[in-house]
Image (cartoon, grey):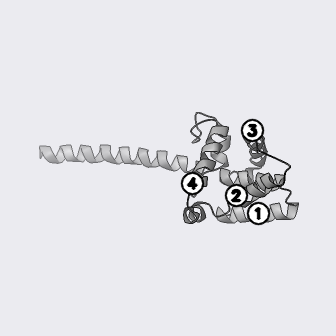
């Protein structure tokens, strides 16, 4: 009998602990889209944000990780990446480097629109790289639609 009462108490404690853990995990989900940090993480205050460091350091780390992925890993994790656009932009002789601070400010502006918050930071980065590379508004709109489709959302008309 004593074992049974102790077991019942342990079961209750375990249920409460698991419920708390599940709620904590679910509360953090909004910071990620398909496993990638998104606009919610980018715009959250530093104490609540899932970004490990400053925005520039976090973006830099994401880009470094992306650079060393195989083509298959890159395609699975984020198929809308823009390495070719970065190369094109650097080869155009208009830029020798792309300043992360400039991109960071452009990403901040991108995430001012609430509908963009679900888009991964890499998507916002690529959108702005394409903007710098001279893509027209129709091409940018199409790319944004593809980003939203990647996030399983439809662009509001």
Graded by Cα atoms within 10 Å as few (under 14), some (14 to 19) or many (20 or more), the crowding at tag 1 reads some
Which secondary structure lies at badge 2? helix
Ranked by sequence position, the earlier of labels 1 and 3 is: 3
Graded by Cα atoms within 10 Å as few (under 14), some (14 to 19) or many (20 or more), the crowding at tag 2 reads some
- Residue at 31% over, 46% down: 14
- Residue at 66% over, 43% down: 42
Q: Which mark is residue 101?
A: 3
Q: Residue 150 vs residue 22: left or right?
A: right
Identify the residue under disc 2. Answer: 83
**Mark 1 or 4: the one toward you:** 4
Q: Residue 66 vs residue 7: left or right?
A: right
Identify the residue under disc 4. Answer: 68
Which secondary structure lies at badge 4? loop
Graded by Cα atoms within 10 Å as few (under 14), some (14 to 19) or many (20 or more), the crowding at tag 4 reads few
Whole-percent x, y for residue 13 in the image: 31, 43
Q: How far, Cα to Cα, is label 3 from label 4?
A: 22 Å
The relative height of residue 75 versus residue 55 in the rendered view (above or below) is below
Q: Say which of 96 and 136 sits in front.
A: 96
**Dots 3 and 2: beta carbons under 8 Å?**
no
**Mark 2 or 1: the one toward you:** 2
- Residue at 59% over, 36% down: 53
Q: How far, Cα to Cα, is label 2 from label 4?
A: 12 Å
Identify the residue under disc 1. Answer: 143
Q: Residue 63 vs residue 14: left or right?
A: right
Which secondary structure lies at badge 3? helix
């Amino acid at each position: 009998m004593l074992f049974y009462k102790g077991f019942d108490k342990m079961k209750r404690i375990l249920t409460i602990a698991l419920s708390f853990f599940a709620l904590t995990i679910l509360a953090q989900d909004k910071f990620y889209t398909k496993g990638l940090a998104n606009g919610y993480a980018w715009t959250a205050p530093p104490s609540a944000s899932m970004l490990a460091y400053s925005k520039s350091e976090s973006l830099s780390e994401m880009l470094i990780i992306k650079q060393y992925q195989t083509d298959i890993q890159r395609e699975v994790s984020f198929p809308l990446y823009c390495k070719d656009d970065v190369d094109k932009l650097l080869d155009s002789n208009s830029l020798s480097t792309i300043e992360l601070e400039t991109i960071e400010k452009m990403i901040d502006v991108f995430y001012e629109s609430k509908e963009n918050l679900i888009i991964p930071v890499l998507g916002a980065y690529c959108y702005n790289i394409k903007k710098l590379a001279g893509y027209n508004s129709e091409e940018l709109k199409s790319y944004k639609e593809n980003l939203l489709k990647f996030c399983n959302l439809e662009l509001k008309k």
